[in-house]
Image (cartoon, grey):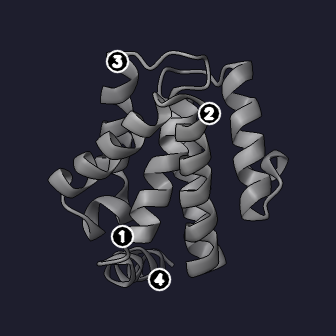
Amino acid sequence: MFGKLKERLTGGAKRLQGKTDLLEGVCSMAALVACADGDIEDSEVEATLDALIGHATLGEAFGPSEIERALDKQLKRAKGGAAGKLALKREIEEMKAKNAADDLEMALMIALDVASADGEVEPEERKVLDDLAKRLGFNLANYL
């Protein structure tokens, strides 16, 4: 059983290599969660980056500097008001159109990890997560 899980995770990392649209979408979701309360604190950025780099599949498929660049790009968009948030949502729609359900589910799980990095999911973060889940075709209640 553990061999199958390891094979699935390792195979997932190989499958994701070069899929920058997925990385951009995951980072867009993380940026939306990070700015859910209206402010992106340095501690949130650090926790978000740690969650992305430390993710078994994503961290294997993309190098730390590539993840950091993608996250930085999306965090700058998140600080760009309504236009920036619209751009983030478009990244997520592009990710949805180009990736399999397993990859989209992984993206949602990473967003959940980002939201709970400080030990709890705030009500504002939950609203954002619910919207993200719906955009990807999932019911957030199934994952909480």
Secondary structure of residue under mark 2: helix
What label does residue 82 carry, if any?
2
Give the foreground label among 1 and 3. 1
Q: Amino acid at mark 1?
A: Thr
Instruction: Kindly indicate whether the residue at mark 4 contacts the one at mark 3 (C-beta within 8 angstroms).
Output: no
Residue at 49 percent across and 48 percent down: it is 28
Return the disc, 4 or 1, that comes first in the chain's sequence. 4
**Mark 1 and mark 2 in contact (Cβ < 8 Å)?**
no
Mark 4 vs mark 1, CA separation in Å: 26 Å
Marker disc for residue 110: none
Name which of mark 1 and mark 3 comes first in the sequence. Answer: 1
Q: Give the labeled residue for mark 4.
A: 4
- Amino acid at circle 3: Ser
Kindly identify the residue that appears in the image at 75 percent across and 57 percent down: 135
Q: CA distance from mark 1 to mark 3?
A: 25 Å
Q: Real-space Cα distance between discs 4 and 2? A: 43 Å
Q: Nearer the viewer, residue 5 or 129?
A: 129
Q: Position of residue 126 (x, y in %)?
A: 73, 31
Q: Is residue 139 visible?
A: yes
Query: Tag 4, which secondary structure?
Result: helix
Q: Would residue 42 appear left or right of 31 to someone viewing this image?
A: left
Q: x%, y% of residue 86?
A: 61, 45
Pointer 3 local density, CA inside 10 Å: few below 14, some 14–19, many at least 20? few
- The quarter of the rendered structure image containing the C terminus is top right
| Residue 47 in the image, given as x and y percentages of width and height | 36, 29
Q: Residue at x 40, y 23 (%)?
A: 44
Give the residue at mark 3.
Answer: 43
Which residue is label 1 attached to?
Answer: 20
The residue depicted at 30 percent of the width and 40 percent of the height is: 72
* Eye-nearest disc, 2 or 3: 2
